Image (spheres, rainbow, N blue to C red):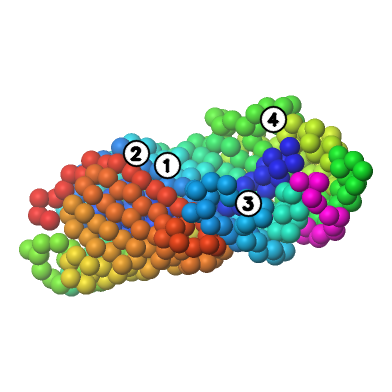
Amino acid sequence: MKKTLLLLCFFGSFFYARSQSYFGFRDDNYAGIQSAIFNPSVIVDSKYRADVTLFSASGTGQNDLYSVNFASILDGGYDFDTEANKNFKSNNRGNFNIDILGPSVMLNITPVHSVALFTRVRSVTNLVDVNGQLVDEVNKDTDFSNSFMIQGGNPNGVTNSWAEIGASYATVLLDRDDHFVKGGITVKYLMAGVNGYLNGNDISVAFNRNNVNPELSEYYSTGTLRTAASYDYDNGEDPKFDAGSAGVGFDLGFTYEYRTNCHTCIGNRYKFKAAASITDIGKLNYKNVVENTYNLNGRVTQDDIESADNIFEFFNANYTKISSRKGIQANLPTALHTNFDWNINQKFYLNLSTDFSLVDAKKVNGTAIANSVTFTPRYETRQFSFYVPVTYMEYSGTQIGAGFRAGPLFVGSGTLFTNLFSNTSKGCNIYAGLKIPIYQNYN
């Protein structure tokens, strides 16, 4: 129960994830729908008459507390407690993200008007400002833990999952000589999933080990803690989707191309492309979220922790509830994306993309992405692309990946080479998808 409690309490604090997905592939001119979820303007004047995505998924985890050797983990026998490198800070961060696209379609109606419809399921879990040493100490077996006193500070964690049905429209705004501009908008109906969060204030924890009977080892704590969930955890209800709650979201994007003014050229007409977008503008209204605030001043034993069935039962049984309220709004991970693409010779490209959060990660129940910059050399043809994204993440540092597109199939990882060859990987990303591409006749 001890490790389970920790993982639940900090919502998977080993990881940091964000709404960035499909590293490398999303910059491909043949990415279709997977690129449109970052910038809806890409659907017009695209490489496809129609792009039908059957299924795609991306999973990402990042953190700045633990770094590991993934090759050793895959070989088996890896001892996380003793072999993982640890970077203790008073404000360690972590998050985990899943992004799944269901059946989706993009259509060019005319040369200057395009539409898209997509279905999508997303889950984002993030944590900021947690004391890494406290996480590590609580995660140890009591038999091997020493007495300690640690200032836990003001940890803030949130988990949010939802489904989307989105409709996109894009049009050409300017097509004059060497200059080409297009814009697009996406409107999304949001179906609420599971929402929960923890927010601490001036937390401190002291551990006093009982050498005779470790089960009687005691934790002394101070401070206050807010907990919330969109299901009735007070009465033992398990996590489930909140079918009665919903919301609306928007994406807005523009793309500029400096073109060679060659209307009959095979391949991409631009020499340089610059794009910008704001995604995930909106909120989810969780009608059934119950927020409880607890006074943590007191003590618990190791046996109290081990005997609790879940984190909420543990708080209710051992601490005083000082306030409660119902009904919460959860923001989407609103972000600014930029993209710069240099067409070197119709097959080789250099791309620079950035992602910046417009949400404060310290906000209570605030879902936010990590700021990042990605540089991607890319080989691109109609039937095949290969790319090597190099990403600097705000929390986990530099990561190197690779991926490819071969007709209807694409597979990749934003961390492939880092995970294979580094002893200190702080993140992991993988994605794959299958689509039915219907190409334009002229390229």
User: At numbered mark 1, what does the secondary structure look like: helix, strand or loop?
Assistant: strand
| Label 4 neighbour load within 10 Å: few <14, some 14-19, many 20+ | some
Marks 1 and 4, how far apart at CA? 27 Å
| Label 1 neighbour load within 10 Å: few <14, some 14-19, many 20+ | some
Looking at the rendered structure, which numbered label has been put on residue 236? none
Q: Amino acid at mark 4?
A: Asp
Quadrant of the rendered image containing residue 349: bottom left
Q: Amino acid at mark 1?
A: Ile
User: At numbered mark 4, what does the secondary structure look like: helix, strand or loop?
Assistant: loop
Marks 3 and 1, how far apart at CA? 29 Å
Quarter of the figure with the C terminus: bottom left
Residue range of the region highlighted in magenta in the rendering = 141-155
Q: Amino acid at mark 2?
A: Phe
Marks 2,1: beta carbons within 8 A: yes
User: At numbered mark 2, what does the secondary structure look like: helix, strand or loop?
Assistant: strand
| Above or below 144: residue 235 | above
Marks 1,4: beta carbons within 8 A: no
Give the mark nearest the N terminus, 2 or 1.
2
Residue at the spot 53% in from the left edge and 50% down from the top edge: 73
Residue corresponding to mark 4: 232
Give the mark nearest the N terminus, 3 or 4.
3
Marks 2 and 3, how far apart at CA? 34 Å
Looking at the rendered structure, which numbered label has been put on residue 100? 1
Measured from the top left, where is residue 97 in percent x and y?
A: 51, 48
Residue corresponding to mark 2: 55
Residue at the spot 42% in from the left edge and 47% down from the top edge: 58
Q: In this view of the protein, which residue sits in the foreground, 334 or 377? A: 377
Looking at the rendered structure, which numbered label has been put on residue 80? 3
| Label 2 neighbour load within 10 Å: few <14, some 14-19, many 20+ | some
Whether residue 66 sits left or right of residue 434 in the image: it is right
Measured from the top left, where is residue 129 in percent x and y?
A: 69, 60
Give the mark nearest the N terminus, 3 or 1.
3
